[in-house]
């Protein structure tokens, strides 16, 4: 498949995915999907602000959602999932500042304004009157008024489990993230490192929170080898959440999957790729996939390397296909 | 409560795989030599290559160098040079770089310059080759001198604008192969030498050159024995 076709397919899929997720989370849009998984709101926000630079309407509706629902987001997780040095960090800070300027309490930890130059936020939109908040972060974007279209997320739907747990446990600690992982991951138990990794918090903090949850009887702990293992009584939690145990939301490693997709999306935007020989294009594809392989493998995506030289390209396509399949609602419930 | 420092790949999270089939496929790829490493192997073992693949590899090397804004002019001997000139039909595992040609003549190839190493490593990754598929192994030959008129006999090929390769000519390959046969034993060196079909005069000339590299009596005895094995029995090696 020519790279231009592959790029169109991938980037269209990413934007459609973002629309369908946010539509289930309160953004003004319609979707037939009702995904069975629990979404990671901070990871999805960072991902969406990146891919929606090709979809201004999505960008602005997500800004409006952030205005209304930003209080449900963790500023610490936002900073953790989009740290300084991440190419989208300024964009996330700009969106947070815009939402705050429009009444939201959303925050991002470790703020650090590093504006160096100005660039167009949307390649397809000419800016007559720039938005001053975005401009202060180096982005030329048309002045944006809130659409007031957004709704609060429906906490009864699986995709919004993170918000529901945050309503129970608050945003000040890692409790909600720990419980979300233990409830949805599908593994019988996990160690503190795996839980901290999924929760997006430091292991030390997660250890303290786990100890509190164990003391409260919300989480069970036992020792295997020299290691503490943690689990939850899914049936009890399902009862607490008023769902059948087999209807608890499922798990995706969204931070890793969406990070890898952002990297790939950025890679496809490199115009040089279209001018390269088949071999060099394959080499570049192999390089990005090699860089992402640890992340993708940890997220459960099989990455293969078959094919020498230019013959790697079909393997690259297959790797992408397996990655994009993780966005498909194969386990959706009606 | 502080967030974790940065998103990192952790083998711990592989326990969250949802798809049993993909899990099995991942397990099948796990490094069988170091199962606890959590690494996955490429299963690519393309370490030997023939003439056409050698051409492809050097073409790829040229492209990588051009992309990096680098330019090299290499002098190559050994199996890959014999293959490139159509003097033998076999496979080889590496490209032996004798020297790097520059405005001031030939300079030793060891160590290979880092831009060349970077490009070489990318090609190794892309084609599943051993990292040293291009190496400066024979560059020591420069120390005691090349056969007279060496550069006038090379065959020069270009692989794009960034890579020129000068392959040692047939007579010089006879010199190097005879030296290798005496120094390292027969095997493929003898096979290559016979494929070059040298005349007695060519072998004698080559033998005299090898003496400039190793004038020891021990080497002389081995050389005489090898020449006899090749059918040359009355050579004056000291002329």
Image: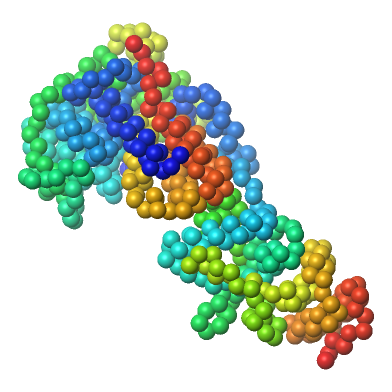
Q: Is residue B92 left or right of residue B58?
A: right
Colour approach in the figure: rainbow
Looking at the image, which is closer to me, A252 or A327? Answer: A327
The residue drawn where x is 54% and y is 72% is B73
Task: Measuring from the top left, give residue B4's x and y in whole percent.
Answer: 32, 39
In the rendered image of this protein, does residue A64 appear above or below residue B135? above
Task: Measuring from the top left, give residue B114's x and y in whole percent.
Answer: 49, 66
User: Does residue A76 appear anywhere in the picture?
Assistant: no
Looking at the image, which is closer to me, B142 or A166? Answer: B142
User: Does residue B63 appear anywhere in the picture?
Assistant: yes
In the rendered image of this protein, does residue A273 appear above or below residue A211? below
Number of disc labels: 0
The residue drawn where x is 52% and y is 84% is B104
Quadrant for the C terminus of chain A, please: top left
Looking at the image, which is closer to me, A310 or B136? Answer: A310
Instruction: Determine the image quadrant of residue A246.
Output: top left
Q: Is residue B39 left or right of residue A217?
A: right
In the rendered image of this protein, does residue B155 appear above or below residue A100? below
Q: Is residue B158 left or right of residue A247?
A: right
Q: Is residue A64 left or right of residue B56?
A: left
The residue drawn where x is 24% and y is 25% is A22
Task: Measuring from the top left, give residue A247's x and y in whole percent.
Answer: 37, 11
The residue drawn where x is 18% and y is 56% is A116
């Amino acid at each position: 498949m020519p790279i231009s076709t592959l790029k169109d397919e991938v980037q269209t899929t990413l934007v459609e995915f973002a629309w369908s997720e946010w539509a289930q989370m309160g953004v003004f849009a319609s979707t037939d999907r009702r995904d069975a998984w629990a979404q990671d709101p901070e990871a999805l926000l960072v991902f969406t602000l990146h891919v929606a630079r090709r979809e201004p309407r999505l960008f602005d509706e997500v800004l409006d959602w952030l205005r209304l629902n930003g209080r449900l987001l963790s500023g610490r997780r936002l900073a953790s999932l989009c740290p300084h040095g991440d190419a989208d960090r300024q964009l996330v800070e700009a969106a947070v500042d815009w939402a705050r300027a429009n009444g939201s309490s959303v925050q991002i930890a470790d703020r650090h304004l590093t504006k160096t130059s100005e660039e167009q936020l949307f390649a397809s939109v000419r800016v007559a009157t720039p938005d001053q908040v975005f401009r202060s972060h180096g982005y030329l974007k048309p002045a944006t008024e809130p659409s007031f279209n957004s709704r609060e997320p429906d906490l009864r739907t699986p995709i919004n489990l993170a918000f529901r747990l945050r309503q129970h446990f608050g945003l000040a600690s890692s409790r909600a993230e720990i419980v979300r992982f233990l409830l949805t991951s599908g593994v019988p138990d996990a160690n503190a490192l795996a839980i901290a990794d999924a929760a997006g918090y430091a292991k030390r903090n997660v250890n303290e929170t786990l100890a509190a949850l164990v003391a409260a009887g919300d989480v069970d702990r036992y020792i295997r080898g020299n290691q503490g293992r943690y689990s939850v009584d899914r049936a009890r939690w399902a009862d607490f959440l008023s769902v059948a145990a087999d209807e608890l939301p499922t798990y995706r490693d969204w931070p890793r999957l969406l990070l890898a997709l952002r990297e790939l999306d950025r890679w496809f935007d490199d115009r040089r790729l279209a001018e390269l020989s088949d071999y060099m294009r394959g080499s570049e594809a192999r390089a990005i996939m090699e860089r992402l392989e640890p992340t993708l493998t940890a997220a459960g995506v099989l990455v293969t390397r078959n094919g020498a030289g230019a013959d790697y390209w079909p393997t690259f396509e297959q790797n992408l296909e397996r990655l994009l399949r993780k966005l498909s609602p194969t386990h959706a419930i009606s | 409560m502080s967030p974790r420092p940065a998103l990192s790949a952790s083998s711990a999270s592989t326990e969250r795989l949802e798809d049993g089939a993909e899990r099995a496929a991942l397990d099948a790829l796990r490094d069988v030599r170091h199962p606890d490493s959590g690494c996955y192997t490429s299963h690519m073992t393309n370490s030997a290559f023939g003439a056409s693949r050698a051409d492809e590899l050097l073409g790829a090397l040229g492209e990588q160098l051009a992309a990096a804004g680098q330019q090299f002019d290499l002098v190559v001997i050994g199996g890959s040079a014999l293959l490139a000139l159509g003097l033998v039909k076999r496979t080889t595992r590496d490209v032996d770089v004798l020297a790097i040609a520059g405005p001031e003549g030939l300079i030793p190839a060891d160590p290979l310059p880092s831009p060349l190493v970077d490009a070489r490593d990318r090609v190794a990754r892309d084609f599943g080759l051993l990292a040293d598929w291009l190496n400066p192994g024979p560059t020591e030959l420069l120390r005691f001198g090349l056969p007279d008129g060496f550069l006038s006999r090379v065959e020069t090929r270009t692989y794009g604008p960034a890579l020129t390769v000068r392959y040692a000519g047939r007579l010089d390959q006879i010199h190097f192969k005879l030296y290798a046969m005496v120094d390292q034993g027969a095997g493929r060196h003898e096979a290559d030498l016979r494929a070059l079909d040298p005349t007695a005069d060519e072998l004698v000339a080559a033998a005299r050159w090898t003496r400039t590299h190793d004038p020891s009596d021990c080497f002389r005895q081995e050389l005489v024995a090898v020449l006899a094995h090749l059918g040359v029995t009355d050579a004056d090696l000291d002329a």
